[in-house]
Image (cartoon, rainbow, N blue to C red):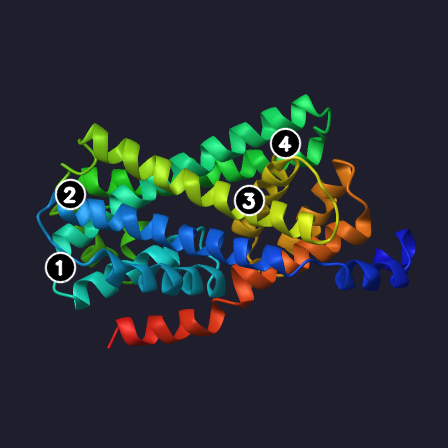
Amino acid sequence: MVTHFGEVKHFVELLRQAKPAWLILALLLQAMTYASVAAVWYLALKQEEMHHSFLSLVPLGIAKLFSDQVMPSGGMSGTTFFIAALNHRGVPVHLCMATLLLSLVVYYGAYLLAALVSVLVLWFYHAIHVWIMVVVGIFCFVAVGIPAGALWVRSLGKKELPALLLRIPGLNNVMSAFANAPGNLLRSPSLVISATLLHTAVFVLDAGTLWVMLQMVGVPVSFWVAFPSFVLASIAATVSPIPLGLGSFEVTCVSMLGLLGIPIEAALTSTVLLRGFTLWLPMLPGMWFAKRALR
């Protein structure tokens, strides 16, 4: 794509023109994403009078990212890791499952909100295409299906499941844990609203990091160009079965930026820089924190 639409020399010049001062802002934005996720867990545990240090939960956010990226499962793998890590820290299983339910509902609620805003922004820019609506439609099915399925399993309690579901290894244990999970976390409007806003902030901060990358390579664009590009790329990576979202995220992000008028070389450069901050940079510490959290 780069060699066809632009000169390699110009691509290299974009990298050389990158302003290192923007790196500090990008690092701060990414640190705030982990703090936002940790704040959701901190509020949920505090609601149940389980007092854990806020700072001790931040590394778990990095470890959750590692789990989410390595094993594609619509965000379930990272959430499952977090529940196991909480249980290792002495949090009762029923409270772990209650936190799981809250995390699923508010995460996908924030995700759907970000997707809706992105579609509206693209409509404003006259950049809506059929493939975009197809990808968003598939994502909406996943985003509604996962938390709805979790709530359905909880509503069944200890009732007998269909024979087909009983063949899934470990499902009986999961059902038992869900059946005993208190529902008061989801019945707290203030907690649900706060957690949803915090998860929404994660999308805003990540999109802000992409905006910073565009500034670094000398493309002063509006934040509303970066936001739908990041969200659509994240959706493509979420519904894709490819570990780490490799390829699916990059192609979608570059394509969206191109649709919104960003030169292909700058779009690719900013996307690669973004992935360095959001994926590769936290990968090694995430793996270390994940291993440490489950000891």
As helix, strand or loop, the secondary structure at mark 1 comes to loop
Which is more foreground, mark 4 or mark 3? 3
Query: What residue is rendered at 61% in x and 58% in y?
Result: 21
Element type at mark 2 = loop
Q: Earlier in the sequence, mark 2 or mark 4?
A: 4
Residue 93 vertical position relative to residue 44 in the rendered view, above or below:
below
Q: Nearer the viewer, mark 2 or mark 4?
A: 4
* Mark toward the start of the polypeptide (1 vs 3): 1
Badge 2 local density, few (<14 within 10 Å), some, or many (20+)?
Answer: some
Which residue has dot 2 on it?
Answer: 157
Location of residue 242 in the rendering, given as x and y in whole percent from the top left corner: 57, 60
Which residue is identified by label 3?
A: 208
Q: Is residue 10 above or below residue 204?
A: below
The earlier-in-sequence mark between 2 and 3 is 2
Q: Which mark is residue 91?
A: 1
Q: CA distance from mark 1 to mark 4?
A: 41 Å
Q: Of the residues under marks 4 and 3, which one precedes in the sequence?
A: 4
Calculate the distance from the C-alpha at mark 4 to the C-alpha at mark 3. Answer: 24 Å
Mark nearest the camera among 1 and 4 is 1
Q: Nearer the viewer, mark 1 or mark 3?
A: 3
In three-dimensional space, the C-alpha distance between marks 1 and 2, rounded to whole angstroms, equals 21 Å
Q: Are marks 1 and 3 in contact (CB under 8 Å)?
A: no
Give the number of the mark in front: 1 or 2. Answer: 1
Name which residue type carries label 3. Answer: Gly
- The residue that label 4 is drawn on is 133
Q: Evaluate if marks 4 and 3 touch, with contact meaning CB atoms under 8 Å apart.
A: no
Q: Amino acid at mark 1?
A: Val
Label 4 residue SS:
helix
Residue 65, picture quadrant: bottom left
Q: Residue at x 61, y 49 (%)?
A: 212
